[in-house]
Image: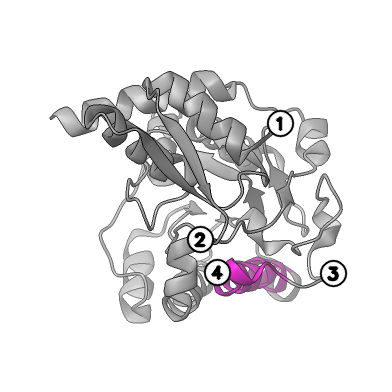
């Protein structure tokens, strides 16, 4: 999803977009490809990702795969003298009970949310790698922490997707099958911040051009919504008129996760796409994808 959005956005720039189909967990393949192609800049968006269910079920894979992917790319970028690298982290790197909105300084100040701890630890390691290569070797490597992302190109699976694609698929199928209700994991009370994927692509290009500091930087919309309100909004957009049933035996995850976006806003960037509009465009894309 992020890679596709970046490819769309970079078509507006005077640059050549390099892509590959490597298994990034294989160090020799990554090193050889970078040595042969020698890009000027890298946006490191590759990762193994998923929602609460996937994180809970496959912690070893989330930790190992992400550690390998980011370590191989960052080290090879240093070896091949890449001019600038932007590592994409996640808001889950912050402690479960961080101050709200969450400032960048909250990193490593408390315990992580257990349901995505393995993924968070991997992303923290990637952030620290960028900082360490900058300190030791003078590399222009930066790290950005986006809030929850959604939009065109997302993956739709009831049990392994993030909340928006999982809900969208369940609500659409329930409407098509004329079901009376849809089950939603947890209480519906957690608050989340969402950013449309094309807004993120704009932010990443902006940071490549305007940011070169050791500290990671947050990227978010600045708006939050409860999971229950999100589900109701999506039901209206999709046209599902049944009942939303909350299964409180399932985990909620972090109770609130709103990013402090003051640093990137002070640089001159802010998101443009309201949540309702973004969800409408995402649903149109989803309907198109399942009709072809």
Residue 119: which disc? Answer: 4
> Where residue 195 sits in the image (x, y, percent)?
58, 35
Label 2 residue SS: helix
Q: Are marks 2 and 3 in contact (CB under 8 Å)?
A: no
Q: Is residue 254 left or right of residue 214?
A: left
Location of mark 2 (residue): 52
Residue at left offset 50%, top offset 66%: 77
> Do labels 1 and 2 touch, CB within 8 Å?
no
Q: Position of residue 9 (x, y in %)?
A: 44, 31
Mark 4 and mark 2: Cα distance apart in space: 11 Å
Which one is closest to the eye, mark 4 or mark 2? Answer: 2
N-terminal of the two: label 2 or label 3? 2
Mark 1 to mark 2 CA distance (whole Å) = 22 Å
The crowd level at tag 3 (other Cα within 10 Å; few <14, some 14-19, many 20+) is few
Mark linked to residue 109:
3
- Which residues are the magenta region? 112-134
Q: Badge 2 local density, few (<14 within 10 Å), some, or many (20+)?
A: many
Alpha carbon separation for disc pair 2 and 3 = 22 Å
Question: Looking at this view, is 148 or 47 the one in front?
Answer: 148
On residue 223, the disc is 1
């Amino acid at each position: 999803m992020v890679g596709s959005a970046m490819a769309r956005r970079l078509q507006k720039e005077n640059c050549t977009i390099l892509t590959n189909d490597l298994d990034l967990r294989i160090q020799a393949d990554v090193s050889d490809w970078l040595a042969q192609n020698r890009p000027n800049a890298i946006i490191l968006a590759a990762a193994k990702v998923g929602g609460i269910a996937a994180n809970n079920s496959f912690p070893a894979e989330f930790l190992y795969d992400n550690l390998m992917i980011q370590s191989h790319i960052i080290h090879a970028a240093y070896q091949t003298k890449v001019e600038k690298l932007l590592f994409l982290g996640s808001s889950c790197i912050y402690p479960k009970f961080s101050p709200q909105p969450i400032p960048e300084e909250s990193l490593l100040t408390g315990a992580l949310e257990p349901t995505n701890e393995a993924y968070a630890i991997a992303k923290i390691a990637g952030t620290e790698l960028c900082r360490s290569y900058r300190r030791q070797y003078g590399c222009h490597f930066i790290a950005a922490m986006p809030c929850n992302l959604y939009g065109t190109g997302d993956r739709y699976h009831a049990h392994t997707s993030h909340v928006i694609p999982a809900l969208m698929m369940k609500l659409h199928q329930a409407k098509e099958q004329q079901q009376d209700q849809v089950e939603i994991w947890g209480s519906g009370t957690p608050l989340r911040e969402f950013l449309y994927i094309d807004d993120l692509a704009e932010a990443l290009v902006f940071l490549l051009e305007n940011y070169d500091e050791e500290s990671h930087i947050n990227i978010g919309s600045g708006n939050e919504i409860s999971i229950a309100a999100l589900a109701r909004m999506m039901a209206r957009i999709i046209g599902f008129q049944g009942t939303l049933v909350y299964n409180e035996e399932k985990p909620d995850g972090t109770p609130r996760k709103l990013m402090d976006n003051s640093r990137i806003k002070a640089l001159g960037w802010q998101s443009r796409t309201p949540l309702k509009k973004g969800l409408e465009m995402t649903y149109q894309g989803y309907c198109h994808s399942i009709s072809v």
